[in-house]
């Protein structure tokens, strides 16, 4: 009897092209918790390989993409999602760059206005 845990994930793992595409999309949406700046699709870290196997297993079990992402988030936290959804907790992280840009534009506008007023 062959151990599925040691088998590499390849195109033979999935019965349909759709499931293979789902696997590619899902592994590109999950962050490698070891590498942190890579998705699990890009990483060869042991944990990333294990997460890829978990994703493949859940796809073959018929789980939806949302169920798989929810499972990963419940198990590893929101950090595992490469693009976490906007929520009250992280809204400042999403809005922060725009707020800083608006403040910078306001300061620049005010400085230019003062400079032109002082020339007159």
Image: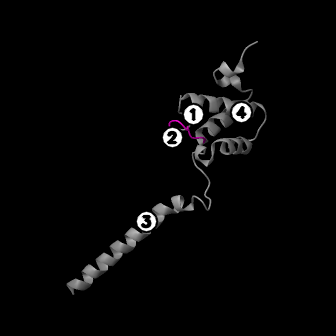
- Quarter of the image for the N terminus: give it: top right
Q: Position of residue 115 (x, y in %)?
A: 25, 79
Residue 108 occupies quadrant: bottom left
Please report whichever mark, 4 or 3, sits nearer to the chain's N-terminal start: 4
- Label 4 residue SS: helix
Inter-mark Cα distance, 1 to 2: 12 Å
- Quarter of the image for the C terminus: give it: bottom left
Which label belongs to residue 41?
A: 1
- What is the crowding at mark 4: few (fewer than 14 residues within 10 Å), some, or many (at least 20)? some
Chief secondary structure of the magenta span? Answer: loop
Start and end of the magenta stretch? 30-37
Mark 2, residue position: 36
Q: Position of residue 102 (x, y in %)?
A: 43, 69
Asked if the residues shown at circle 1 and circle 3 are in contact, with their CB atoms under 8 angstroms apart, the answer is no
Q: Which residue in the rendered view is the most extreme toward the right? A: 62
Please report whichever mark, 2 or 3, sits nearer to the chain's N-terminal start: 2
Mark 4, residue position: 19
Which label belongs to residue 1?
A: none
Between 77 and 53, the residue placed more toward the observer is 77
Q: Residue at x 58, y 31 (%)?
A: 47
Q: Residue at x 57, y 61 (%)?
A: 91
Mark 3, residue position: 100
Residue 33 lies in the magenta stretch: yes
Left or right: residue 31 compared with residue 3: left
Please report whichever mark, 1 or 2, sits nearer to the chain's N-terminal start: 2
Q: Position of residue 106 (x, y in %)?
A: 39, 74
Inter-mark Cα distance, 1 to 3: 33 Å
Q: Is 90 placed above or below 82 here?
A: below
Nearest to viewer (mark 1 / mark 2): 2
Please report whichever mark, 1 or 3, sits nearer to the chain's N-terminal start: 1
- Please indicate, yes or no, whether residue 52 appears anywhere in the rendered image: yes
- Label 3 residue SS: helix
């Amino acid at each position: 009897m062959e151990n599925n845990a040691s088998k590499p994930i390849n195109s033979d793992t999935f019965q349909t092209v759709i499931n293979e595409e789902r696997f590619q999309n899902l592994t590109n949406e999950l962050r490698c918790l070891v590498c942190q700046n890579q998705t699990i699709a890009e990483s060869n870290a042991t944990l990333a390989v294990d997460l890829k196997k978990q994703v493949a297993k859940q796809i073959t079990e018929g789980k939806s993409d949302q169920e798989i992402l929810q499972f990963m988030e419940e198990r590893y936290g929101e950090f595992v999602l490469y693009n976490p959804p906007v929520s009250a907790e992280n809204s400042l992280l999403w809005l922060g760059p725009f707020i800083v840009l608006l403040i910078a534009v306001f300061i620049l506008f005010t400085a230019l206005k003062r400079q032109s007023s002082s020339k007159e």
